[in-house]
Image (spheres, rainbow, N blue to C red):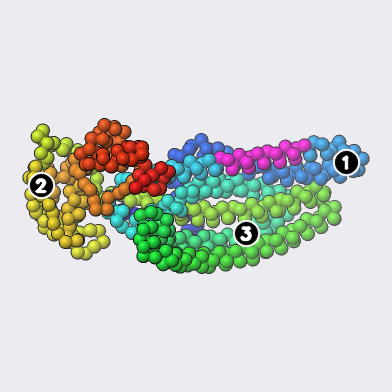
Amino acid sequence: MVATKSKSSDEKFSLAQVFTAFASLPRVFALVWSASASMTIGLGVLSILRGLTPVVTVSISQLVIDSVIHGIRVHSISPIWLPVSLQLLVSLLDRSLTSLNTVVQQLLQDRVANYIQLLILRKANTLDLSSFEDADFYDNLRRATNEANYKPVSMISQTFDLLRTTITLVSMLFLLLQLAWWLAIIAFVLPIPSFIAGSRYSWYGYRLMRHEAPARRKMQYINNVMTVDDYNKEIKLFNLGNFFIGRYIGFMNSFYEDSKKILVPRQFYNFLWSSLTVAANSGIYLYVALQAVQGRITLGALTKYTQASIQAGSSFQSLLDGISNVYENALFVNTLFEFFAYTPAIVPPAHPVPVPLPDDGRGLDIEFRDVSFTYPGKTEAALSHISFVVRAGESIALVGRNGAGKTTLVKLLTRLYDPDEGEILIGGHNIRNYDFAELRQYVGVIFQDFVKYQMTARENIGLGRVTDIDNLLEVKDAASKSGADTVIDGLSEGYESMLGHWFEGGSS
């Protein structure tokens, strides 16, 4: 059922993995672009503009300081008006670009999250019943819906941020090279150890997420058991509340401890490398200050170079952090693509045969020929070499113990599964030759665990033939034939009465 298999969560971390994560960028970019091309372009343009403002700000700071010193010498404030005005304009521009970037990114985030959720629902709609009876599938589904919804936009925005910080870094290094080449080297090298440590712990976090997925689904199941009316009667009757709460607490504490094992050392190493960066920056400040004291640079240049040193170090740190974050997001986004890689085993034929409905309304012959079937993941066959014929208009009852295969016959008849051996014929044609969507329209099935939708009475009936869900005459006719009309007539809103207790106005 799965088209591709993910890498084992036990795979060891290597620095090369960080850069290979960028291989998924084109696919992620296409996904975000499909959600909103205009906002994706806007985010990129804003990132470039924001990358240019720091070097302009630093250069203007030198002009401000030098003009103030000149104004003191000539006893006039006129030299400071222009640089101060420029500084104000650039600051306002930077604030406006930052605010606009936040707005665009959040809107794009919402648009992409909605788009991905639709893709997940549409993909789920194409998959076979066997997928929904498989635990691994639910683990992948949970990861796709809970972890990967917001990651694509984060990955793209962080990639644009890499472009922004690269522009800032190059411009700041250019300024530092004007004073001393080794200042640029120090600013460039210092953040590297922090980057390696951060990437390693990003990998640990991703591996933990994959490992915890089954347990987190169990935790969500317990939450559902404790908060949904379907279970509440038995929870009260058998006094099960504290039992399930205890299990919930067990999962909760386990997740907390696992998270702490990653968070604490990650922040410890981050503190160590940050302290080294602070010490190195202090040395750079001292060197630049000595150059100013010795008259080799102006006070304005002192301000420019110290700010450039700070900006260069922080920009390179941001660049490496951005690469690490892109890598982390790529790991999570890959879980989304793993889900999209699921493919249905049961597909309609390229040239389906129309279902030959007879004019007398008696139905069609049904024949099972030497049919065998084993559920995926099971070793014991649910059906083994079953053969029988039901003639059109004939009424039969299938009787057998639990697990004998009665429900399995219905699942095969409606092509929720396909048999491993043999064939099933309706109206003389193998049902594989019919479009299964058309075939299912003419088969009435009520499972033992039938679904009770938290919707109106009309909608609950209409879902049996969704094309007529708004056709009240057809809905009433179906209700009359089933005897449900007498119950519905007693409801306060009739066919528009909400059933269930989840929503306002609902009733049993």
Task: Kindly report the secondary structure that dominates the magenta region of the rendered protein.
Answer: helix
Mark 3 Cα within 10 Å, few/some/many (few <14, many 20+)? Answer: many
User: In this orientation, does residue 206 appear?
Assistant: yes
Counting residues from the start of the chain, the first of labels 3 and 1 encountered is 1
**Which residue sits at x=38%, y=54%?**
229
In magenta segment, residue 90: yes
* Secondary structure of the residue carrying numbered label 3: loop
| Residue 138: % across, % down | 36, 56
C-alpha separation, residue under disc 3 versus residue under disc 1: 40 Å
Mark 2, residue position: 395
Mark 1, residue position: 71
Mark 3, residue position: 191
Pick the front one: 507 or 355: 507
- Viewer-nearest of discs 3 and 2: 2
C-alpha separation, residue under disc 3 versus residue under disc 2: 78 Å
What's drawn in magenta, residue-wise?
85-104
| Residue 72: % across, % down | 90, 43
